[in-house]
Amino acid sequence: MKTKVLVTGGAGYIGSHVVRQLGEAGYDVVVYDNCSTGCPQAVLHGELIIGDLADTDRLYQVFAKHRFSAVLHFAASLVVPESVANPLDYYANNTRNTLNLLRCCNVLDVNQFIFSSTAAVYGEPEENPVTESTPTLPINPYGRSKLMSEWLIQDYSFASRLRYVTLRYFNVGGADPCRRLGQSLRNVTHLIAAACNTALQRHSELRIFGTDFPTPDGTGIRDYIHVEDLAAAHVDALRYLEQGGESQTLNCGYGQGYSVRQVIERVKAISGVDFPVIEADRRPGDPACVTACADKICKVLGWQPKYNDLDAIVYTTLAWELHQEKLRTKRAARQKLVSINKERSVRSKITEIAYKLP
Ligand code: UD1
């Protein structure tokens, strides 16, 4: 019999890539997602239950019905400025809902848990690359809501049979190279999305937030990881727990940093569009540099990234978005044709009636 796993937030950008890979690896998947930002069509495998983690009765029913052997918990809010404006929503959606999930795991004896955390728990690190033992000093409610969830999971695991893998994501980008899945770039603000949107002429210019950071070219440095490699890390983490592995907290990055200017240069080169770039003030709360030491994840999980290359991230992002644009154009043309045909049939009906008139 196939192993059954629960994936919260499996209709979202990262969750949907993981669900697809879990399906390919032979797992039986149940996705629980309120589809507030996720998209039902992105669930390419298993069963989708549209529900909210705040609805504890519903959640309990799902747990009681399915008897999961593991939970992969993605559902969360993740926009830093929004977390500063609405901290209570972030603590509710991220921290309290993790608690709801753990309570179900407790009652129904589900003892393997994979948690989506973030490099935001490190805040503004004094040294790079950061290891998993670098002090966690988050500088915004988003990072704190995730760190509090990490503590909840850890404390509960000390008091129970739960074993967990917490994955701290660095800057995620890219799309499925076969163009089955990706992130819709509309309303997305992260750098690769913003640069691709500008290359696609949806914005007139790209702003660089801060050119006076203590970095070689003055702009912020980040560790960009391809969503396919990140998804593979989750499948590896699940296998690790199934084989009896002990609880772990692991960085998910490549250990290679790129500055904002370097990212822009690659987006321009790959798209072939030389879009305008404006130098603007720093964005509040942006650290100068955050890169991962990825030694631990490679050693513990045997994780072997395949897309460790900024060009692959940019290329698949652009390819996915252009594919979506083509589909939108086709859909619009089809709709127009349908409405022309409808209009024609109404007109011919009127003519028919007119002929019948005395
Ligand atoms: C991202 C994630 C965050 C995660 C963190 C981990 C998103 C929305 N945020 O934050 O959840 O915790 O990685 O490291 O996915 N920049 C510009 N112009 C732009 C956009 C960005 O100059 O139009 C700069 C930023 O100032 C920063 C760099 O690009 O220096 C990366 O920013 P961004 O892509 O927004 O990601 P993070 O803020 O690092």
Image (cartoon, grey):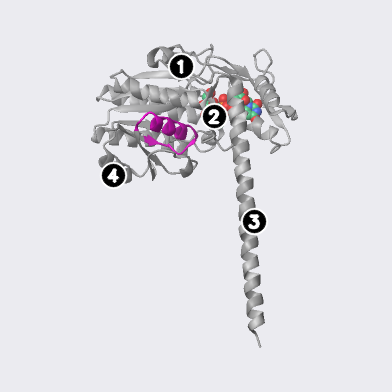
- Residue at horizontal 51%, vertical 27%? 227
Pick the front one: 44 or 237:
44
Q: Which residue is mark 2?
A: 177
**Residue 322, numbered circle:** none
**Residue 336, numbered circle:** 3
The secondary structure type at the circle numbered 3 is helix
Q: Which residue is mark 4?
A: 61
In percent of width and height, residue 39 lies at 49, 42
Q: Nearer the viewer, mark 4 or mark 1?
A: 1
The secondary structure type at the circle numbered 2 is loop
Of the numbered discs 4 and 1, the one sitting upstream in the chain is 4
Q: Say whether residue 20 is magenta.
A: yes
* Label 4 packing within 10 angstroms: few (<14), some (14-19), many (20+): few
Of the numbered discs 3 and 2, the one sitting upstream in the chain is 2
Q: Which residue is mark 1?
A: 304
Q: CA distance from mark 3 to mark 1?
A: 47 Å
Q: Is residue 75 visible?
A: yes
Q: Are marks 4 and 3 in contact (CB under 8 Å)?
A: no
321 lies above or below 117: below
Q: Nearer the viewer, mark 3 or mark 1?
A: 3
Report the span colored magenta: 7-27
Q: Nearer the viewer, mark 4 or mark 3?
A: 3
Taking the image in four quarters, ligand 1 sits in the one at top right
Q: Say whether residue 81 is magenta.
A: no
* Label 1 packing within 10 angstroms: few (<14), some (14-19), many (20+): some
Q: CA distance from mark 1 to mark 2?
A: 17 Å
Q: Amino acid at mark 4?
A: Gln
